[in-house]
Image (cartoon, helix red, strand yellow):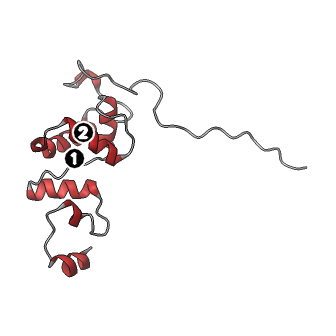
Amino acid sequence: MGETLIDEFGGTVPKSIEEMTRLPGVARKTANVVLGTAYKIPSGIPIDTHVQRLAYRLGLSDEDKPDAIESDLKALVPQDEWIWFGHAMIWHGRRICQARIPQCEICALNGVCPKRGVGGPSRKKRPPRRSPVASPD
């Protein structure tokens, strides 16, 4: 990545999502975080595991691919709030609405949250069980 920064960008971290994602190891999530945090550029909403889980539980997106979830959230949240929203969702997912044991009893969103997937079967599809194969004797 360092070589690409020097060779293609004169040693300066680029300020656009298109240029950022040309850097090795940088996808949309990282680019959105860096652009928003370092440059205050609302290029998009970072979608990590926490944001993906919350978007589903809160009924904000039925998608399971980060780009599609980001598209759904960008349509709901005004662009000037994308940076704050992304950080707030990540924080909320880490501290309150955790994957295995969400703390619904202390959640500020408890009264409006549909809690999709909480306390019930996971929405992840599990592979079908394979029947045991009889060993040839």
Kindly give the residue lying farthest to the top in the view shown.
Answer: 111
Residue 27 on image: x %, y %: 30, 59
Q: Quadrant of residue 101?
A: top left
Residue 10 on image: x %, y %: 14, 79
Label 2: state its secondary structure: helix
Position of residue 83 in the picture relative to residue 113 (left or right) = left
In front of the other: 106 or 70:
70
Q: Quadrant of residue 88?
A: top left
Residue 72 on image: x %, y %: 28, 39
Residue shown at the point (87%, 50%) measured from the top left? 136
Q: Residues within 10 Å of mark 2 (few under 14, many from 20)?
A: many
In front of the other: 74 or 55:
74
Q: Is residue 11 above or below residue 80?
A: below
Q: Which residue is mark 2?
A: 73
Label 1: state its secondary structure: loop
Position of residue 38 in the picture relative to residue 96 (left or right) = left
Q: Which residue is mark 1?
A: 45
